[in-house]
Amino acid sequence: MITGVVWALLAGVMLGLYALPEKYTKTFQYENTWGLFFVLTMFVVPVIASTMLLGGFEVFSMVETDILMKMAVASVLWGTGVMMWGRAINHIGLSLGFSLFIGTVILIGSIIPFFVNGIPADNVFVTILVGLLVVLTGVVMNGKAGLVREKDEKDSREEKKGSMLAGIIIAVVGGLLATGFSFANAVGSGPLGEAVAELDLAPWKTAIAVMLPIFISGGIVMGLYFILQLSQKKLWGGFKTVHFVPNFGLIFIMAVFHYAASALFAFAASKLGASGNTVGYAIFNASCVITAIVSGIMVGEWKNASARAKGFLYTGLACMVTGIIVIAVANGLTA
């Protein structure tokens, strides 16, 4: 159990930090950076990983088509949700955007596996729900922190009046759609795990198998979105720059971290027992939020916020840490 918790925490930290190299790219517009990122992380990296670690794509022919279709549909919803999150952070910043988006993902996405794998014993189920409610308190506190910060900065952001509320709505709706990732993982991990075993591959490689259909399906939505954005804004020429090679290297690092974080989550879930998908998902995403909040503070997102706004933010952070502990304890009750 401890091993699974540690891997879930590590995966969350990686997801919380994966976007940092973006701050060092030069001349690229938002659409150039993230369009290239999603091509690499959703298509190139998963295909390379599957080819190298699974020996090809035979494993997918061993799983019923309806399983892969369910994963694909859920992953399209996930991709749509991630796109909405990308727009939300333009309104409300990295810290609050991560908090609301992934907070929603935690609350809903952690419950979804119960409908796929069944509800655990009462004491475990109740304790997990308590942990999720503590996380919910943290989400509410972070939302309040953002609204107070908007009021603090009203004079300097008058032209963006209403953007905070819009960003919060976009982040929450995006989070609801993004729970498709949790459903796809819960549906596919069992059948793909059996196929991996039949091919005499190491059990941990199930995580690699699960990620390919999720990323490819979700990537279609993201790819189409950025093709449209690059075309409408006439930004394709932005890739013709002397900084392309170093930018590509930085974005490729982002792609590897993003993919590896998701694969590590799937691996962690497999190590956490019967409620692994729920427990792992909550720990993974909560630790991501915590990492993102700390990162946002370090880069100065909250430097102009009042002590009151920061108080709400830190309270939300404390609640999320407490929620992780409660959820981890709940998983220990299954041992």
Image: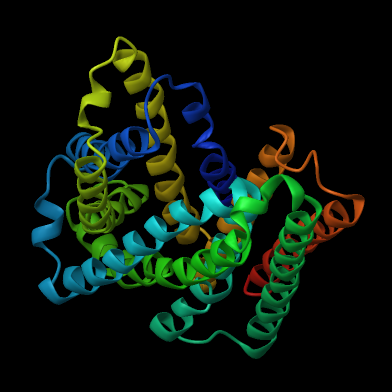
Q: Could you tell me if residue 31 is visible in this image?
A: yes
Q: Residue at x 52, y 49 (%)?
A: 90
Q: Residue at x 57, y 57 (%)?
A: 285
Q: Quadrant of the N terminus?
A: bottom right
Way the structure is coloured: rainbow
Question: Measured from the top left, where is residue 117 in percent x and y?
Answer: 42, 81
Extreme-top residue of the structure: 242
Quarter residue 243 falls in: top left
Q: Could you tell me if residue 2 is visible in this image?
A: no
- In the picture, measured across the screen, residue 11 lies left or right of residue 137, that is left
Q: Residue at x 67, y 40 (%)?
A: 296
Comparing 203 with 329, the one in front is: 329
Q: Quadrant of the C terminus?
A: bottom right
Comparing 141 with 328, the one in front is: 141
Question: Measured from the top left, where is residue 131 in percent x and y?
Answer: 71, 73
Extreme-right residue of the structure: 307
Question: Measured from the top left, where is residue 27 in percent x and y?
Answer: 39, 21
- In the picture, measured across the screen, residue 45 lies left or right of residue 280, that is left
Quarter residue 227 falls in: top left
Question: Measured from the top left, where is residue 78 in percent x and y?
Answer: 36, 64
**Residue 299, above or below 46:** above
Comparing 228 with 172, the one in front is: 228
Comparing 46 with 151, the one in front is: 151
